[in-house]
Image (cartoon, grey):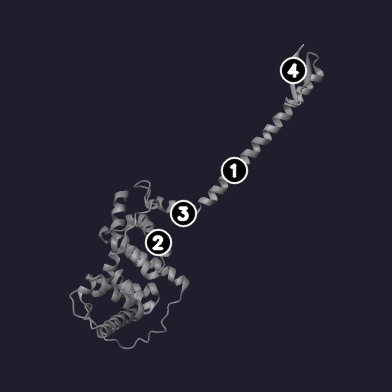
Amino acid sequence: MDNTELEKIYEESYRAVYWTAMSLLKDEDEAQDIVQETYVALISSYSSIRDKDKVYGWLKKTAANKCLNRLTRTKTVNTGDEFLEAVEALPEDFLPDSIVESDEMRKIIMDIIDNSLSEDIRTTLVLYYFDEMSTKEIASALGIPQGTVLWRLSFAKKKIKQEVEKYEKDNNDKLYAMAVIPFLTKLFTAEADNVPMRPMPASLIPESASSVGSAAKKISASSSSKVVAKKGMSALAKNVLIGVAALVVASVVIVAIVRHINVEDPHYVAHTTVLNDDQVSGDYWLMIR
């Protein structure tokens, strides 16, 4: 993968990768970490992806799995609110396209999803409708039965429909109607499309087409820069001390030689001139007789 190809993929997929991470983690710093890790994984794995047309989906699933790995380290999957009662089967197109096309209406539905569904159910919706994970893949990633995944999806659609109808009644504003495409997929996609674009970090750009691992090295290098700096300073201090010690030794040797010459060789005399207070205190020189 060359830099041009990487930049193109990044520009086409950044919003989707970021929205996945932010939707699942709900933390800006952690979401950006996941984005970085996802593209580093792409750089190192790109040659093994057989169907390059599926890179977009591969990135979303990779980001989702990385998010789930983080979540499992900080929480336990909660199924206490899930009784798996029989749920009415609803078609995928249970809300109209017009809602997705309106920022205001879309916000209403997103608020319903955020406020009326548990975090586990909402996560399942994002993984299935936006990240294109199968119910089997979701079950494996979350460590729950596949039947639970299916129940969550059905329950979520039923709950959203109920809340939409309640909203219509309370606000005298008709939202519910039938459409021709999976509504939630289009809803989440529209939300992701509104994510502000960020430039690709320089740390992700490989030094050459052959060095696909250089991005990962740059990222790891940034985390160890302080250690390297400390080592560099230690080495410099050591060299300075060695140089000072060598200078002192050399000075002692020279003084010893001069004294030896003054005492042993009658052709040399050490002469000292005492100067006034306004002058330098002493001047040593050698005179040939």
> Which residue carries the number 3 mark?
220
> Which residue carries the number 4 mark?
286
**Residue 249 to residue 69: above or below:** above
Q: What separation in Å lies between label 4 and label 2 (alpha carbons)?
A: 74 Å
For residue 58, say whether it is visible.
no
* Residue at x-position 38% and y-position 72%: 141
Q: Residue placed farthest to the top in the image?
A: 289
* Residue at x-position 20% and y-position 73%: 98
**Residue 202 to residue 195: above or below:** above
Find out whether the residues at labels 3 and 1 contact each other: C-beta distance under 8 Å: no
Q: Amino acid at mark 4?
A: Leu
Q: What separation in Å lies between label 3 and label 4 (alpha carbons)?
A: 62 Å
Find out whether the residues at labels 2 and 3 contact each other: C-beta distance under 8 Å: no
**Where's residue 216, x and y in %?**
42, 54
Q: What separation in Å lies between label 1 and label 4 (alpha carbons)?
A: 40 Å
Q: Which mark is residue 235?
A: 1
State which tag comes first along the sequence, 1 or 4: 1
Indicate which label's residue lies in the foreground, 1 or 2.
2
**Where's residue 9, x and y in %?**
29, 56
* Residue at x-position 40% and y-position 59%: 37
Q: Residue placed farthest to the front in the image?
A: 278
Crowd class of label 2 (few under 14; some 14 to 19; many from 20; radius 10 Å)? some
**Where's residue 148, x and y in %?**
35, 81
Q: What separation in Å lies between label 1 and label 2 (alpha carbons)?
A: 36 Å
**Residue 160 to residue 72: above or below:** below
Viewer-side residue, 38 vs 163: 163
Viewer-side residue, 244 vs 49: 244
Horizontal placement of 11 versus 207: left or right? left
Q: Amino acid at mark 1?
A: Ala
Indicate which label's residue lies in the foreground, 1 or 4.
4
> Which residue carries the number 2 mark?
32
